[in-house]
Amino acid sequence: MNRSILRTLACSALIGIAAIGNVEAQTTPSAAALPDFTGIVEKNAAAVVHVEARYTGETSRKSQTAGDQAAPGQDTPDDPQAELFRRFFGMPMMPSPQEQKHTSLGSGFIISSDGYILTNNHVIDHADKVIVRLQDHRTLTAKVVGTDPTYDIALLKVDAGGSLPAVSMGDSRSLKPGQWVLAIGSPFGFDYTVTQGIVSAVGRNLGQQDQPYTSFIQTDVPINRGNSGGPLFNLQGQVVGINSQIYSNTGDYLGVAFSIPIDVAMNAVQQLKTKGYVSRGMLGVTVQPVSDDMVKAFKLDSGAGAAVVDVTPDSGAAKAGIQVGDVILDYNGQVLQQSADLPPLVGMTKPGSKVPVEILRNGSKQTLEVTIAETSRDQAAATRSGAAPSARGGAAALGLTVQPLDNDTRKQLGLNPGQGVVISDISGPVAAQAGLQAGDVILMVNQQKIGNVAEFQAATRDVKGGSTVLLLVRRGEQSQFIGLTVPDGK
């Protein structure tokens, strides 16, 4: 740092002192009530650790590729939003350039005095050796007890030859927007950095395919590369989350950060200890958001809930009587505000449990008891949220033509005999602008199952200007409800 910079900083400091003095003269009672975080830091800093993952050979190159990746799904360039998500892969500062190619830094925290440590899976993924550095400067080799990429959790174990300081756990389910929270970690390799902020939102689903079961805690706590795996504390000094991701187009903190709820993480920890893997519940449905068109067509009060677009044969949902076209309003006593709320709730349900599921069908509510199955360990999502590419359509007024669907095509799509008609031609602006394509299969019209052309024509006979028609469209392996409103005068 040169002399001119030092002088500038000195002048800034003097100005800052004068300004602070001015503010202190005008201190209000509300300012005096701001929290003091020093007690939380003094009590818990010793339980926070620096995590270093080391790689060699081919594993090193694989891990470096993962580390350079901005986020899950970044390798799909047609999803621009996914490119904004950055996981905090290590950004080593001390090692030489050659060493940096084989090292990744992150954070973690001791959850029990016998040496169990919690961090993110992406911090140590594919590592050949994991090193943990404690606050007293001891460096220990950690054993990877187990990992769960879906929750992005990794459980480590060190032998420190005695009792270690450990954090205490809070209840992430009780968090509310506006509450103060505190992070301790190793951003850019600066160990035991303390930052604070507030909870910005809870139950935040990021729409990422590899983490559909996580409802994140959103905060404005300044966290950066190297904070990954570090703890998020409440004002009681309890851990309520694991700092995991930021929303950024630069890779650096821009005011929006996300943490994994600690109740989700500890559920995974317990399973990793006892079974070596994490099992999740499976309902057996594919859902999508309730669109404005669906609200009109179904005459719903709001867009809350999850619309069922597919039911897995022989699943708990199918056996309980859940049908395509149902809107799930409540799962096991938890009201669904959006379709993304469902996968995390199902995932946390113990397989074999029987849970009440409230649905809306044809304007009437009913509650069904569903036995939850277990998601296979190699299955990406048991209860998927999302749908196929946008597609809409209807009869002549909707600008499309349909024809019978042959049995071979039905078999390829996993459909039953006598199910669906295929779009053969797009001839009008309503269907064309909606993105419908020849080859799309229409399974339902306004919740009425369609098995042949005559049934489709009957279901769309009364379509006229101003009408809203709701179609269930199948494209490839995905189905989606699409509402079309015919302009007046058509």
Image (spheres, rainbow, N blue to C red):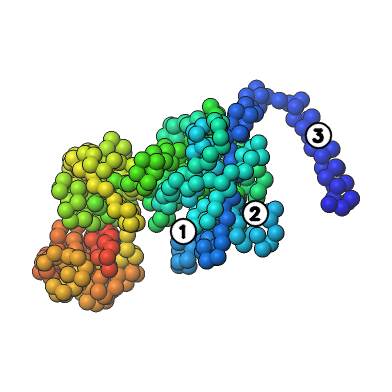
| Residue at point 68%, 62% (across, down) | 97
x and y percentages locating residue 333 in the rendered image: 28, 35
| Label 1 element class | loop
Q: In the image, what residue type sits under mark 3?
A: Ile
Query: Neighbour class for label 3 at 10 Å: few (<14), some, many (≥20)?
Result: few
Comparing 130 with 383, the one in front is 130
Which amino acid type is marked by label 2?
Pro
Disc 2/disc 3 C-alpha distance (Å): 35 Å
* Front residue of 304 and 184: 184
Residue topped by disc 1: 72
Please give the residue where the numbered disc 2 appears in the rendered image: 92
Closer to the camera, 85 or 238?
A: 238
Task: Name the residue at 29% across, 73% down.
Answer: 437
- Secondary structure found at label 3: helix
Q: Residue furthest front?
A: 161
Tag 1: amino acid: Pro
**Label 1 to label 3, Cα distance in Å?**
45 Å
Q: Is residue 423 left or right of residue 457?
A: right
Q: CA distance from mark 1 to mark 2?
A: 22 Å
Q: Earlier in the sequence, mark 2 or mark 3?
A: 3
Looking at the image, is mark 1 or mark 2 nearer the viewer? Answer: 2
Q: Residue at x 11, y 67 (%)?
A: 417
What residue is shown with label 3? 17
